[in-house]
Image (spheres, grey):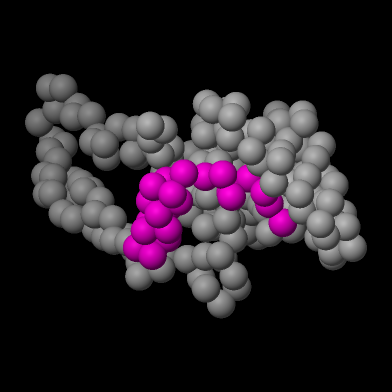
Amino acid sequence: MIAPDSLSVLDCQVLLQLGNRLQLQRKAQGLSTIEMAKRAGISRMTLRAVESGDPSSSMGSYLRVMAVLNLSGELAFVAVDGRLPRQAGSDTVRSRRARSTAQVVISADETRHQLQDLQSLALHRQAVRVVQQDPVLLDRANKILSRWLTTRPNSRSAPLWQEWEQILKYQSWRKILRSSQRAQQLRQASPLVTVLPEAIRLHVLAQVRDLKKGVTLGKHALIRDI
């Protein structure tokens, strides 16, 4: 039995919000995509992936962008667990640390179809993974697509289905896992999610329902009084 991907819907939403924040910060600092990519030492395509919260982008790419925007300190705080090194042999500087708890609520905005897009993206991430593990499911998706094209050749979705023929043939998964408008359109006409095992589909939908209510994350932080 194929288990669900460990990357949850919540994880994807956090990345989407991070990408959106990085994009807003870039614009606030007056940086074009060309200038930003140049300073970060990445391609514009990689920058677009980072700003769309693409889970397949490397941590290094995210960190390069955050460094240019002077946000890498936030990641560093997580990496060192918020602890400042004590100065050995210092009698004049003493630090008092108190543990406190901060909470962050993660949710998706239904008014902008964000939740629907997130659900579609999550289902397709799972579907891509299962067809890679089980070629029989990929064959089934091809047969379903062929039947759609044969029985409904004049459908408004026909051009998208024709594009899906190439996607399935060459397994061009990145084309459907982006946050672009075209990727969203392709996911809406997808034969791929029809072969997703029911248990995995229900697993994703349950995560989406939780996110709709808002998921509260607890974060332990250190308060310093020096």
- Assign the N terminus to one quadrant of the image: top left
**Residue 15 appears in the figure:** no
Q: Nearer the viewer, residue 115 or 158?
A: 158
Task: Determine whether, in the image, residue 210 is placed left or right of residue 132.
Answer: left
Percent across and percent down for residue 13 are 48, 54
Q: Tell me the residue at 68%/51% (across/down).
A: 190
**Residue 147 appears in the figure:** yes
Q: Nearer the viewer, residue 219 or 28?
A: 219
- The majority secondary structure of the magenta stretch comes to helix
The picture quadrant where one finds residue 84 is top left
Q: Tell me the residue at 58%/35% (across/down).
A: 137
Percent across and percent down for residue 189 are 72, 56
Q: Which residues are magenta?
A: 189-211
Q: Is residue 146 above or below residue 158?
A: above
Residue 203 covered by magenta stretch: yes
Residue 1 covered by magenta stretch: no
Q: Nearer the viewer, residue 76 or 135?
A: 135
Q: Is residue 48 above or below residue 138?
A: below
Percent across and percent down for residue 22 are 59, 51
Residue, far right: 154
Q: Tell me the residue at 89%/63% (across/down).
A: 154
Q: Tell me the residue at 12%/38% (across/down).
A: 94
Q: Is residue 76 above or below residue 156?
A: above
